[in-house]
Amino acid sequence: MNLLDVRDLRVSFGTPDGVVRAVRGLSFSVDRGRTLAVVGESGSGKSVATQTITGLTRGAEVSGSARFDGTELLGADPATLRRLRGARIGMIFQDPLSSLHPQYRIGWQIVEMIRAHQPQTSRQAARRRAADLLTLVGIPRAAERIDDYPHQFSGGMRQRVMIAMAMALDPDLLIADEPTTALDVTVQAQVLSVMRKLQQEFGTAIILITHDLGVVAELADEVIVMYAGSVMERAPRRDLFYRNHHPYTQGLLASLPSQTGRRLTPIPGSPPSLINPPRGCPFAARCPHVFDRCRAVAPPLVEVYGDTRHQSACWLGDGEAVAA
């Protein structure tokens, strides 16, 4: 049994303009010691999906199933979610400055999180654990800096603090939402190295939410490509880069900077409205290979290239898929 199994997750929000269908039929699984990357443009539903799983999308209309180690998360009571969040499911949010309380020292925040789930742990023991974690994630002079405030750290250091807090109780699952956003490449490499090291040490499963395919290449085992709330392609990391199938995946890869100096090839147009999603394939209006059937009927997510691990939601057959 996988650590986390999500099946047909659908999330909608009511707005004055209509119902936003943010996630439309998402299914995936992740096991211990593995990393699942969820990629796609902003607004594709990546963050909403994982926040819904952990009970952080209040007011949303939710359906489907999300079983974590045998426990159904969707519709779980607040006490169950509080017991799991932090202790067994750690989260690294996109903006560490807004996730850390500006008026409390970082050591105090980590200690309080540890004692909230392990009240039998003394403050002294929790503080030692916090200092050890800050050292583990590469904070220099951790024993001294534990009493600093969040604004006294750089962006990369604050992100490391968030990783330390998320890993404080050795969670079974770590959800990392854009963990390297706005970091320079050197700090980004250091943060990814810390996450990889922690995963190897504790066997943690990781869901990595990102729009940076360079980060995916560094860390992921399997990749889900989302667009307009739906899965366009699912594949092992290497297949996604070297034997991809969906035109949207190919468009994302073509927009990456290249060492050969070739010009970037952006995807023309904009994502569709999730209040009035298109009738057929959501990518049809931007796809260079679109034909009539694409606009009329949404393609199902099916196996491609004879590999059960590789699926694509596209009417192009295997032989018609365009090499990236």
Image (tube, rainbow, N blue to C red):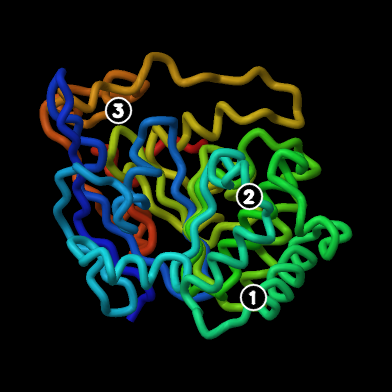
- Give the foreground label among 3 and 2: 2
Q: Nearer the viewer, residue 261 or 227?
A: 227
Q: Is residue 259 above or below residue 94?
A: above
At numbered mark 1, what does the secondary structure look like: helix, strand or loop?
Answer: helix
- Name the residue located 37 percent from the left edge and 31 percent from the top edge: 43
Q: Position of residue 105 (x, y in %)?
A: 68, 52
Residue 151 as seen in the image, left or right of residue 37: right
- Name the residue located 67 percent from the left edge and 64 percent from the top edge: 196
- Give the foreground label among 1 and 3: 1
- Name the residue carrying label 1: 123
Q: Position of residue 87 (x, y in %)?
A: 47, 72
First in sequence: mark 3 vs mark 2:
2
- Name the residue carrying label 3: 283
First in sequence: mark 2 vs mark 1:
2
Q: Is residue 121 above or below residue 56?
A: below
Give the alpha-carbon distance from disc 1 to disc 3, as whole Å. Answer: 53 Å
- Mark 2: amino acid: Tyr
Give the alpha-carbon distance from disc 3 to disc 2, as whole Å. Answer: 46 Å
First in sequence: mark 1 vs mark 3:
1
Examine the image and state in which quarter residue 163 appears. bottom right
- Name the residue carrying label 2: 104
Q: Which mark, by number, is residue 170?
A: none
- Name the residue located 75 percent from the left edge and 28 percent from the top edge: 260
- Name the residue located 49 percent from the left edge and 57 percent from the top edge: 91
At numbered mark 2, what does the secondary structure look like: helix, strand or loop?
Answer: loop
At numbered mark 3, what does the secondary structure look like: helix, strand or loop?
Answer: loop
- Mark 3: amino acid: Phe
Give the alpha-carbon distance from disc 2 to disc 1, as whole Å. Answer: 16 Å
